[in-house]
Image: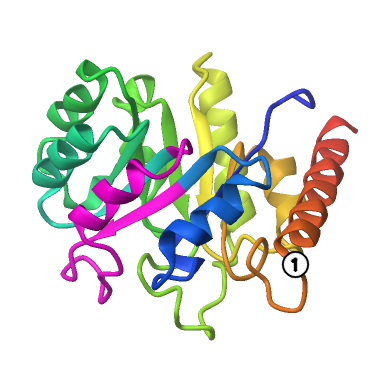
Amino acid sequence: MQNRKIDIAPSIMCADLCNLEAGVNNIEELGLDLLHVDVIDGYFSPSMPLGIDTIKQLKTRTNMKFDVHIMAKDNEYFIQEMIQIGAEQITFHLETSNHVDRHLQLVKKSGLRAGIALNPATPLSELEYILPYCDTVLLMLINPGFATDKNEKQVAYAVEKVRDLRQLIDEKGLDTRIEVDGRVSFETIPGLVSAGADILVAGSTSLFAKGQSLEDNKKLMEEKIKAGLYEEAK
C-alpha cells in the first residue's frame, strides 16, 4: 500500500473567484493536474460559489482535469451539465439521490469516473451494494458547504471512517479510491493518508494556507503525504 499514488486536488473555492483563470493557471504551474470543482445549488448547503457557465468557460482555459463534487437536490440535472462540460470525474451525494444506480450509470456510460459522496455522519453501510460501481468515494470531513465557517472543525472520527472504508474496499478486492474533503490540513494529512486516503482536497488549511507561497505549501503537503505513507508502511 505504501506505493499508492496520492493526488492533491486544489479546491477552486479557495482560489480568487474574481480572477479564476489566473488562479487556476497558478495552480497548474505547480504541476498539479486535478482541480476540485464544487457545484452547489444553494439548497443543499447555504452557498453557491460558481455558476455552470463559469465552470464551462473555465474548462476551456486550463488543461487540468475537473474533479466535480455536486452538492445539490437535483443530481441528474447537474450530472448531465457536467458531462456536457467534459468533467473527468463526477461525484454526487448519496443523501440526495433517489436513483443512485441510474446516476452512477449515467456518469460511467459517458466514459467518466463516477463517485459517491457521503456527509460526515452517513454510515459506510449505505455503500454496501453500490461500492463496486464507484470509482471514488468522497468522504466529507466537515458538513459540506460550510467551509467558510472557520470554527467548524474536522469531525473527530475522520481517520476512523477513512480506515474503515479502506478495509471495506480491500475486503471486496476493489480499486475504488478514497477522496477526503474538509479541513484537510498539514496537521491531519499524515493520519488521513496513513488510514488510506488517496485524493486530498486542498483548501485554506493546506495548499492555500496564508503566510506561505503556493509552492511552499505544496512542498509541505508532499512532506506530510510522505510521512503518512511511511507510517502506513510500518
Nearer to me, 86 or 148 = 86
Q: Quadrant of the N terminus?
A: top right
**Side of 218 relative to 17 (left or right):** right
**Side of 98 relative to 145 (left or right):** left
**Side of 225 relative to 128 (left or right):** right
The picture places residue 116, in percent across and down from the top left corner, at: 33, 39
Hey, which quadrant is residue 135 in on the image? top left
Q: Residues within 10 Å of mark 1 (few under 14, many from 20)?
A: few
- Membership of 82 in magenta stretch: no
Nearer to me, 161 or 70 = 70
For numbered disc 1, what is the local secondary structure? Answer: loop
**Side of 108 relative to 139 (left or right):** left
- Membership of 63 in magenta stretch: yes
Q: Quadrant of the C terminus?
A: top right
Amino acid beneath label 1: Ser
Using the rendered image of the protein, determine whether residue 201 is visible from the camera's viewpoint: no
The picture places residue 98, in percent across and down from the top left corner, at: 10, 42
Q: Which residue matches tag 1?
A: 213
The picture places residue 90, in percent across and down from the top left corner, at: 31, 37
Using the rendered image of the protein, determine whether residue 222 is visible from the camera's viewpoint: yes
At 25% from the left and 76% from the top, the residue drawn is 46
Q: Is residue 45 above or below residue 7?
A: below
The picture places residue 36, in percent across and down from the top left corner, at: 45, 49
At 48% from the left and 38% from the top, the residue drawn is 64
At 40% from the left and 68% from the top, the residue drawn is 143
**What segment carries the magenta color?**
36-65
